[in-house]
Amino acid sequence: MSISTRLATFDDLDLIAPLFDGYRQFYGQPSDLALAQNFLGQRLSKQESVIFLALDDKAQALGFTQLFPSFSSVRTQRIFILNDLFVAPTARGHGVGTLLLKAAAEFGQSQNAARLALSTGIENKAAQRLYEANGWKRDEVFYYYNLML
């Protein structure tokens, strides 16, 4: 299988939305394709995120990753939060996740970002193996907290 990655545009919304819906289902949310399209459409039209799309040689969507821009005050540089990474179940084991991580890293470097950051579920061992195999390091210095609103 030949796989390529590219920066997604608003015109790719119909390709990305089913993957995003699958991602949300993986994390326990009910399927809602209209919600997925609306959310992604807003992010893309407002340029609030950067999405990379993985495609096979027949232009079938295999996976995506979404980056949200932020900043590091300490480093006084841009950072990107790799908020979403999803590979269609039928495409897993073919290197799609690795290609998406590589595309995200290359993009971050091209933007002179200090780092990419992500979080994943403690039980998501497959994702942890993927990240660590691609050079990501688990934080052992800081605790991260959330305040649900």
Image (cartoon, rainbow, N blue to C red):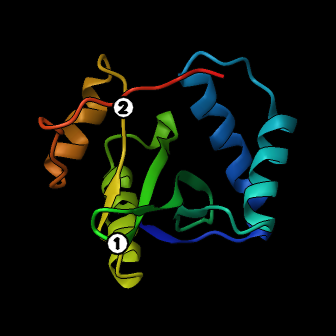
Give the number of the mark in front: 2 or 1: 1
Residue located 15% across and 55% down the image: 135
Q: Nearer the viewer, residue 146 or 26?
A: 146
Q: Is 106 displayed left or right of 86 in the figure?
A: left
| Alpha carbon separation for disc pair 2 and 1 | 25 Å
Could you tell me which secondary element the residue under label 2 belongs to? loop
> Residue 67 location in percent, x, y?
51, 58
Q: Which residue is mark 1?
A: 76
Residue located 36% across and 23% down the image: 121
Q: Amino acid at mark 1?
A: Thr
Quadrant placement of the N terminus: bottom left
Label for residue 134?
none
Q: Is residue 129 above or below residue 73?
A: above
Q: Is residue 55 above or below residue 18?
A: below
Q: Are marks 2 and 1 in contact (CB under 8 Å)?
A: no
Q: Is 42 displayed left or right of 96 in the figure?
A: right
Q: Nearer the viewer, residue 7 or 141?
A: 141
Label for residue 120?
2
Quadrant placement of the C terminus: top right
Crowding at dot 1, Cα within 10 Å, few <14 / some 14-19 / many 20+, comes out as: few
Q: Quadrant of residue 140?
A: top left
Which of pointers 2 and 1 lies earlier in the amino acid sequence? 1
Whether residue 124 appears in this view of the structure is yes
